[in-house]
Image: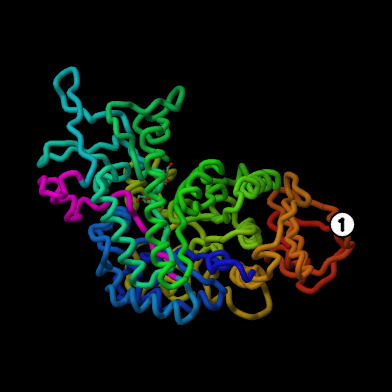
Amino acid sequence: PESLQWWQKTIVYQIYPRSFQDSSGNGVGDIPGIISRLDHFTYLGVGAIWLSPFYPSPQLDFGYDISDFCDVDPLFGTLQDFDNLVKECHDRDIKVIVDFVPGHSSHLHPWFQKSVRREEPYTDYYVWHDGKTGDNGERLPPNNWLSVFGGSSWAWNEERGQFYFRPFLPEQPKLNYRNPRVVEEMKNVLRFWMSRGVDGVRVDAVSEIMESADKSQDEPCNMKGDYPQDQYEYLNHIHTSMHPEGFPLIRGWRDVMDEYEKKDGKSRFMVIEIYAPAKSRNVYREFGGNPFNMDLVDLERSGLSGQSLKSLIEEEYSNIGGGWPTFVLGNHDRNRLTFRFGREFADVLNMLLLTLKGTPTTYYGEELAMSNIEVSFEDTQDPFGKNMGPERYELFSRDPCRSPMQWDNTRHAGFTKSDHPWLPVHPDYANCNVKTQTKSDGSSTSLTLYKALATLRQKPAFLCGGIEFAICNKEVFSYIREDKTSGERYLVALNVGKVPALSDFSGSPVNATVEICTCSASKRLTTGQTVSLQGLTLNPGDGV
Ligand code: TEU
C-alpha cells in the first residue's frame, strides 16, 4: 500500500452541484452548500470528491455548456467560495477533482461570438463548414453526422452564413482541435484550475473530442429495419467517435498535470469519461489517460449474473497490464441503481464496487440507495429528454437520476429552504436520508454498510491484494482478496440472481468469520459470527 498514490487508495464521490446542497435558498445547490456538508465524507471515509461543472453557463445542459472556463457561475458561488472549498477539503484530507469539458463551449462563450463575426484569432476556433446544396437548391449540412442528443450534428449560423459542428446541443459548438491555438487555450484552462490547487480532473466526453478532417464522408448505417434515422444509434460513428487524431490531446493534458506533479511531487489524477471496450481503454491509457471502466454503468438487470460480472471484471484485470482499474456503477447520465436493478441489489452492488481492486467512483446518493424520481414530459428539464418528445423522453431523460440529495426528513429532505427545488425530491426521503440511515440503533442501513465497506477497503488485501475468482454462476459472484505479506484473506460472496443459492466455498479453511454483510444478509448473519463455508446460503441481494 505504501507505493500506491492517493487516487489508488481513495473512493471518488461524484457531486452534481445543482443537487447536493442549496445554501442560498434559490432551489439550486451551490459551493457553500457543499462546504457545509463535508462532514459527510469524513463520516463515510471518502477521500476525494469530483464536482460536475460549476462554471459560468446558461445551464442549457446544466453546466456542460460553459461560457467561461475560468470562473464560477454566480448560481454556484464565487471563485473565493471555490478556493474556500479546496482549503476546507484539504484541511480534512479530501482531494478535489473538477470536471474538465474540453470538447465544446457554450454558444454564449466570447470565443464563439467572435468566431461567428470572424474576428481574429477566433475565426477557426470552432468547426465551421459551408454545407452542401440539395437537388432543389436547398441548403444542407455537409454530411449525415448525428448529435448524441439526436438530429443532425450541424447547426446553421445565419450571421456567419455557415454551419458549425455540435455533437451535443446546438448551444454547445465543438471546439476545433485542428487549430493549435485552441489546443493551447484549453491547456491554459487546465493550468488555471491546477494552480488553484485541484488534485485532479475528470475529462468530459472524450470520445467526441476529435472528428474527421474530411467532412464529405457520411457515417455508415448501423441499423437494419425500422429505426428513427435521426437518432444517434442509427449510425456507426467512425468519423466523430474515438477518432485516433484525438488521442494525442489526452497526452497534452496529461503533460500539463505532470508539470504540476514535478513542481511539488504530488500525484495528480486524470480520469477520462469514455464508454469504450477494454481494448480501446488501453489505447487511452497509452496516451496518459485513466479511463473509467463503464461496463458496470452499462449493465442492466437483464444482464446481471454471477457469470456476467465475472467475465467483465476478469476482462478488465487481464487486459489492464500495469494500468489501474477505475470501476463505477452510475453517474449523472444514467438511471440510478435501484431503477436499473431493483432496491434489493443496491447494497450488493456497492459491496462489489468497494471490494474490487481499483479506484471506485460513487455517484451522490448511491450510498443511501436513492431512487429515480418520476418526471412528466411537461416538467422535464433535461434537453436530451425534451428532444426525444413525449413518446420517448423516458428512455433518455436524465432528470430522474439528478434529484436533490436526501439529507434528513425535514421539508425537501434538508436540501433547500426554497419552495421550489429545481427538481423534486424523491417522495421516499422520509425514510431514505442520511440522518435516518446514520441512526445508531444497531441495525444496518445502506449508509452504514457503505461506511463499513469504505473502512474495510483500506486493508491491504482490498487496496492492492490479488483477486482470485471463486464460485461464479447465474446467482453467485464470489472472489478472494488476499494480501500475501500480511496473510489477510477475505472471501466476498454476492448473490445477484433471482433465487437463493446454497454454495460450498470451502477450500483450505472450513469456517470463516463474517466481517461485513449487506442489509438483507444481516437478517441471518452478524459481524463476528463464525460460519461454515461448506454450505452458505445467500438470498438474492445478499452479500457477505
Ligand atoms: O456526456 C458525454 C456523452 O453523453 C457521451 O459520452 C455519450 O454517452 C456517448 O458518446 C454516447 O455513445 C458528457 C456529460 O457526462 C453529459 O452530462 C453532457 O451532457 C455531455 O458530456 C455533453 O457535455
Residue extent of the magenta highlight: 96-124
| Most foreground residue, 184 or 10 | 184
Q: How far across and down, in percent of the image, does residue 486 sit?
A: 76, 70
Question: Is residue 490 toward the left or the right of residue 426 in the image?
Answer: right
Residue that appears at 62% across and 42% down: 303
The amino acid pointed to by label 1 is Ser
115 shown above or below 428: above
Q: Which residue is mark 1?
A: 506
254 shown above or below 75: above
160 shown above or below 347: above
Give the class, few, some or many, for how many residues have Cα within 10 Å of label 1's Cα (few <14, many ≥20): some
Q: How far across and down, in percent of the image, does residue 230 sit?
A: 34, 32
Q: How far across and down, in percent of the image, does residue 34 sit?
A: 40, 74
How many circles with numbers are drawn on the protein?
Answer: 1
Q: Is residue 390 visible?
A: no
Q: Secondary structure at mark 1?
A: loop
Question: Is residue 152 toward the left or the right of residue 505 in the image?
Answer: left
Q: Is residue 480 magenta?
A: no
Q: Quadrant of the C terminus?
A: bottom right
| Most foreground residue, 144 or 494 | 144
